[in-house]
Amino acid sequence: MIHLFRRCVAFILLPALASGCAIGFDSTLFVTKSNVGLDVDTKPPTAELSIARREVVVAPAFVDGQTPPVLAGFKTGNRMLFGFDVSSIFAGGDAAWTLTEKQPQANSTAALCLPTEPKGDLRLGPLPLGQVTLPREDEIRPFVFGTDTTFGLKAAWSGMTAQFPDSLKIGFNRKEMALAPVFGRAVQGDAACPYRVQMPAFLATIEVGVDAQTPQSAEAAYRQSFATGKAATALAGEEQVKRILLSRLESAYAKGTYNPDGNSACILNWASAADKSLDSAKAGEINDWLASRGVPGQLPLFLYAQQYEAERALFISEKSITCP
Amino acid sequence: MTELNDIPEEQVPQVIQAFILSGKSLITIEKQADDMWTVRGE
């Protein structure tokens, strides 16, 4: 059994080595697969009617547990038979780092700082297969990045299964894959970061919204983006893109009953501008506070819902707001 | 998705402003059977 496992490992690693790529040593492999709906396939034999999500990353890990950053987010809001919402985000390198920053900094980078040039020993059990070093600044390596999305119905025939299709997909099905080289560079005269390691930035997002509550109001919206390099990093800083990721953290469905109390009036008085409308800066302060409490995006419920009575009292106390 | 029910008609504009400032980009309003309003945002 162990021999079989080693053979399998060698089968995967040796061709990669022969092509100059050692996944997990000098390159990062990041793969996700999502399915919302029906997915029937003969290769491999699969039949599922589900919400399914698979994520795999094989990346080099350096001293202090540092790894090139990758990030994936997936959200689906099912409206049963009346449509669904799906959004997904897939990023790596500087784009992944920028997505996680609350306030993107001008010179922020996802580069890793290592004390020395790392070397990887590729082994097959006791047998050394060779030493792997990171590609240097004067080398060129291929960077593979792609997505495959099906939204609706997809049936594929190879001709091997007579009149039956090889695969049948109904709903939302998406695969995302990146094989990114990890570059290393010695930085002369920088004691804080003598050896920098970085991989290319990449970003893919998709948002699908289907509403079919009534035939008259049925609508579908579809938005997709795909970028690499500086374009990916710049796109990752956009609020619209960040919202796809952050919306994962919101509760799927928050509901409240309008019943403002005295603390509502107090907070509204504190947060209102001269024209009695809500001041956007004060609203932003409340939004930040709610996000820190783990309930982002619930400003309306916070201000007006009877279910948020305790939060309002706590906010007034923490912010030392004087109520009339 | 956020939903607030039983809103008096005269308060709907203020509530919608709160939905907008909370970052909701798709806001729908619906009149209830009791003449109160429901606002949803996502």
Image: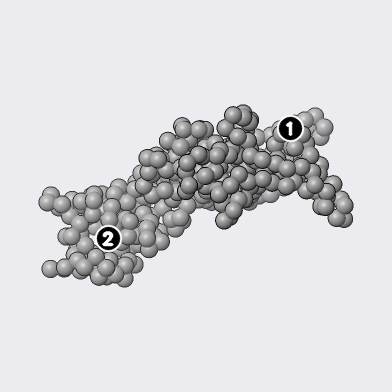
Look at mark 2 in the image and give the residue it sits on. Answer: A303
Picture layout, residue A84 above or below residue A144: below
Locate residue A285 relative to residue A174 in the image: left or right: left
Say left or right for A289 vs A164: left
For mark 2, give the secondary structure.
helix
Q: Which residue: 74% across, 37% down?
A: A16
Residue A220 in the image: state x and y as whole percent: 47, 37
- Foreground pick, A85 / A92: A92
Residue ID at (31%, 67%): A311
* Foreground label between 2 and 1: 1
- Which residue type does callout 1 highlight? Ser
Circles 2 and 1: CB distance less than 8 Å?
A: no
Rendered residue at 41%/52% (across/down): B1
Q: Are marks 2 and 1 on the same chain?
A: yes
Q: Look at 45% across and 45% down and name the residue there.
A: A99
Q: Which residue is mark 1?
A: A19
- Using a 10 Å C-alpha cutoff, classify the residue at mark 2 as few (fewer than 14 neighbours), some (14 to 19) or many (20 or more): many
Relative horizontal placement of residue A68, taking residue A129 as reference (left or right)? left
Q: Identify the element where label 1 is drawn.
A: loop
Location of residue A244 in the rendering, given as x and y in whole percent from the top left corner: 45, 45
Corner quadrant of residue A155? top right
Tally the numbered discs.
2
- Residue A24, horizontal then vertical, whole percent: 67, 45
Chain that bears disc 2: A
Q: Quadrant of the N terminus of chain A?
A: bottom right
Q: CA distance from mark 2 to mark 1?
A: 60 Å
Q: Is residue A42 visible?
A: no
